[in-house]
């Protein structure tokens, strides 16, 4: 298990996007980066995942256990990126097959059951709802068994009730891992995060979070009050308000 | 289902109408039979020369199919190699584009000179003509893997060859199929050009022969058989791809 520490300026091409980042993301907890679209959240996700792109960090990304990070990160993104021609079992085991390892079909079945898709192993992604597709993507992340999991707006395309259910499921099945959650949804951040930052041009501001274990009840008065306060702050960050 | 059953009937009806119109034009204008024989005369020529036509058609069809298979195999192998190796891309791609700038039909006399009047020169012409469309269509498809899946493959530490066969090839199949459709349209052209340049057998040869002897009906009969062959090939491909 490892935590992450990210310090420095996020550069996009030649222009600095966010200055003076100081993100301490503790091991085994959910760290959330909240911010409006275009602020550079996904660039940070790509940075942590080690994916190519125009983004660059002038500074350092360190692990708290001093082991190298590459190969220990799993990523789940908004689209899910399921293979439309393969059934769910094949989709969940694609990682092993891409590496040339023997796919663990029994474990894939277990994980599909764990995310509530038992009996649908032979279906194709196109036969599923958006929420079910994200469940498959979640099972695919789980089978990779990576200590660090990056969730890049994984539930933003889902309807409200499905999103709430998926948040609870993700909090349960990913408990104990170091999770970096990228989102623009204040409620999502307040429900799931152990520590959270609001990203803006000026930098990252640490957020005060409600007490209690995650996933927090979305009806709790302190959470709703925090959400209202956060939405007010987010309004100031939106580049152009009518 | 209903529509599928009625489509061939409609096509036959259209053909019958076209033939009737053609026959009417021939009767009404009194065009000499050696300029434009009516469908009736062509049908009679087809019947009278059935054995001759069949023998020449067999030669043409065999070269057509052999060249098609060889060209597709070579094109697919080239595209896979190009997709796998940046070195091959650097070296082969300019050569491919240059080769395409040379009209392959113009090579027919040279190929006949090198390979003789037999089947080999026809097979090679067909192969060369369809090689580029198949290669370029399939290669373009292989390189158009959605970026999100490319990211996923990298996160899962996919080996290049497994990435190719598990992700790129399935995504490129529709592109390959459009390349195959082009190949099936070009191949009959190519085989006839090959026979025109120099051959002692085949439908193209028969057409030249009949033309020289003023047997215009036989020429049209050969053309009719050739058109039927092309249509059958196209229909077979469409069926196979479904």
Image (tube, coloured by chain):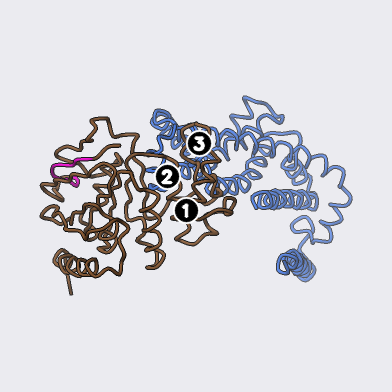
Chain colours: A brown, B blue
Q: Nearer the viewer, mark 3 or mark 2?
A: 2
The picture quadrant where one finds residue A74 is top left
Residue B6 image offset from top left, x and y in percent: 74, 68
Q: Earlier in the sequence, mark 2 or mark 1?
A: 1
Q: Residue at x 41, y 64 (%)?
A: A162
Q: Which residue is mark 2?
A: A142
Q: Residues within 10 Å of mark 1 (few under 14, many from 20)?
A: many
Q: Are marks 3 and 1 in contact (CB under 8 Å)?
A: no
| Vertical arrangement, residue B131 with respect to residue B49, above or below | above
Judging depth in this view, the residue of B182 and A218 nearest the camera is A218
Would you say residue A231 sits in the magenta stretch?
Answer: no
Give the number of the disc on residue B105. Answer: none
Q: Earlier in the sequence, mark 3 or mark 1?
A: 3
Q: Chain of mark 2?
A: A
Magenta region, residue range: A4-13
Disc 3 versus disc 2: distance between alpha carbons? 15 Å
Q: Residue at x 84, y 52 (%)?
A: B46
In this view of the protein, can residue B25 be seen by the observer? no
Q: Residue furthest top?
A: B114
Q: Which residue is mark 1?
A: A115
Q: Which residue is mark 3?
A: A97
Residue B80 image offset from top left, x and y in percent: 50, 34
Q: Nearer the viewer, mark 3 or mark 1?
A: 1
Disc 2 versus disc 1: distance between alpha carbons? 10 Å
Q: Residues within 10 Å of mark 3 (few under 14, many from 20)?
A: many
Q: Are marks 2 and 1 in contact (CB under 8 Å)?
A: yes
Q: Chain of mark 3?
A: A
């Amino acid at each position: 298990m490892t935590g992450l520490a990210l310090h420095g300026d996020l550069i996009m091409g030649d222009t600095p996007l966010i200055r003076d980042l100081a993100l301490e993301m503790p091991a085994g907890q959910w760290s959330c980066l909240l911010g409006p679209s275009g602020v550079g959240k996904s660039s940070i996700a790509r940075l942590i995942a080690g994916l190519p792109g125009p983004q660059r960090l002038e500074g350092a990304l360190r692990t708290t256990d001093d082991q190298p990070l590459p190969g220990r990160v799993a990523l789940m993104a908004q689209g899910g990126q399921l293979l439309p021609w393969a059934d769910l079992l094949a989709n969940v085991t694609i990682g092993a097959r891409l590496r040339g390892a023997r796919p663990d079909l029994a474990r894939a079945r277990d994980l599909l059951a764990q995310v509530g898709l038992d009996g649908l192993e032979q279906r194709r992604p196109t036969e599923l709802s958006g929420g079910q597709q994200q469940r498959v993507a979640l099972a695919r992340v789980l089978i990779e068994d990576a200590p660090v999991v990056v969730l890049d707006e994984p539930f933003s395309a889902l309807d409200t009730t499905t999103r709430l259910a998926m948040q609870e499921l993700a909090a349960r099945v990913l408990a104990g891992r170091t999770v970096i959650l990228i989102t623009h949804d204040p409620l999502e951040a307040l429900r799931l995060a152990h520590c959270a930052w609001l990203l803006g041009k000026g930098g990252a501001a640490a957020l005060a979070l409600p007490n209690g274990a995650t996933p927090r009840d979305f009806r709790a008065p302190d959470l709703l009050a925090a959400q209202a306060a956060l939405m007010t702050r987010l309004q100031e960050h939106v580049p152009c308000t009518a | 289902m209903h529509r599928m059953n009625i489509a061939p009937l409609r096509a036959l009806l259209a053909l019958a109408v076209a033939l009737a119109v053609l026959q009417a034009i021939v009767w009404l204008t009194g065009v000499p039979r050696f300029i434009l024989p009516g469908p009736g005369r062509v049908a009679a020529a087809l019947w009278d020369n059935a054995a001759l036509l069949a023998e020449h058609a067999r030669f043409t069809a065999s070269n057509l199919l052999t060249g098609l298979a060889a060209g597709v195999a070579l094109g697919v192998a080239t595209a896979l190699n190009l997709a796998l190796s940046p070195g091959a891309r650097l070296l082969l791609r300019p050569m491919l584009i240059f080769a395409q700038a040379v009209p392959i039909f113009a090579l027919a006399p040279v190929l006949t000179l090198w390979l003789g009047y037999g089947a080999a020169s026809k097979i090679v012409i067909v192969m060369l003509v369809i090689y580029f469309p198949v290669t370029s269509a399939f290669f373009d498809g292989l390189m158009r893997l959605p970026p999100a899946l490319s990211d996923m493959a990298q996160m899962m530490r996919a080996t290049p060859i497994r990435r190719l066969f598990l992700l790129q090839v399935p995504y490129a199949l529709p592109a390959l199929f459009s390349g195959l459709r082009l190949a099936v349209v070009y191949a009959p052209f190519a085989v006839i050009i090959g026979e025109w340049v120099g051959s002692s057998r085949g439908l193209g040869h028969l057409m030249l022969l009949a033309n020289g002897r003023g047997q215009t009906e036989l020429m049209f009969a050969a053309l009719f058989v050739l058109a039927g062959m092309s249509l059958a090939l196209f229909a077979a491909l469409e069926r196979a791809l479904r």
